[in-house]
Structures are given as C-alpha cells and as structure tokens.
Amino acid sequence: MERVLTREISRLDEKIHKYINKVTKLEDYFNLTQIHVLVYLVRHIDEDVCQKDIEIEMGLKKATITGLIDILSEKGFVYRIQADDDRRKNYIKLTQKAIEYKDEIAKHIHELNGLIAKGISKEELESFYQTIDKLNGNMDSLKEMN
C-alpha cells in the first residue's frame, strides 16, 4: 500500500489520543488539542491569558478556540473573566479542578514526548522539525485557509 502523508499524520494523532486516554485519569475528557490548551494555560498560570494568546500559540482560528474553551468550560476546567479595560476581551483561567490535574497532565505529556522520540537522534528530530515546519508553511500558504 502506498504511504500517504495525511493518513500517516492521522494514524499518529489517533495513537497519541489513545495513549493520553489510557494513561490519565481523564479518560473521555479531552482530545489532544484540548490538552494542549490546558498545558498552555498551566505554563502561563500566573499570567493574564486571553483567547488571542491561545489562538496564536495553537495556530487555530478564533471560532475553533472559542469552541475548545466552551467545551473545557462546560467540563469545569476553565472559566472566562471579562477584562476591566475592554469588554470584548476575556481572560481564560484554570479552575481548581484543572489545577488539581495539572501535574498529571504535564507529566504524561512529557512522558509521551519522550516515548515518541525514543530511538530518534537529535539530528533526526531536528530534521523532523524542519520538515513539519515546511508542511505547516505549505498549509499556511493555501489561499482557502486564509
């Protein structure tokens, strides 16, 4: 069977999702993108993080991030606080529930990164990052996405 780039990316994404669901107590709670939003908020826990910051970090559109935040809010892991200086701006904060899970989430993401990179040299990993940057650049240049 011919290998297809998009299929291979999808297969890896599915394996990562299954791993996260298997090893965390958060099974059935999150997909990988939601976890990365939580990890970002954990890394910036003492800062005022607005939705635009998450959009830039994740490289996703406003509507997508709004949906992610809505889901995380419904599940009781984040909440919004309206900025005093701009009624259109909301800060995104972790709830106490999310803070209780933050160490577990961070630990499993760190472990997963180590497991995925097992047996891969620094040079191979750097080559992978260069390739992924090119793939992302190719996708960014598509007119339909902008």
Image (cartoon, grey):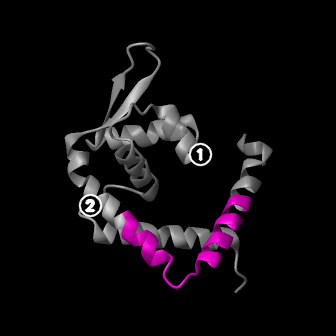
Q: Give x and y (percent) for residue 77.
A: 28, 43
Q: Secondary structure at mark 1?
A: loop
Residue name at image x 56 percent, y 81 percent: 120
From the image, tell me which residue sits under label 1. 59
Residue name at image x 45 percent, y 21 percent: 89
**Residue 128 disc label:** none
Q: Secondary structure at mark 2?
A: helix
Tag 1 and tag 2, C-beta contact below 8 Å:
no
Question: Can residue 67 be seen in this snapshot?
Answer: yes
* 145, 90: nearer the viewer: 90
From the image, tell me which residue sits under label 2. 104
Residue name at image x 33 percent, y 40 percent: 45
Separation of marks 1 and 2 at Cα, in angstroms: 25 Å
* 13, 39: nearer the viewer: 39
Question: Can residue 28 be seen in this snapshot?
Answer: no
Q: Which residues are magenta?
A: 109-134
Up-down: is 115 above or below 10? below
- Looking at the picture, which amino acid does disc 1 mark? Gly
State left or right for residue 20 relative to residue 139.
Answer: left
In the image, is residue 121 part of the stretch drawn in magenta? yes
* 37, 7: nearer the viewer: 37
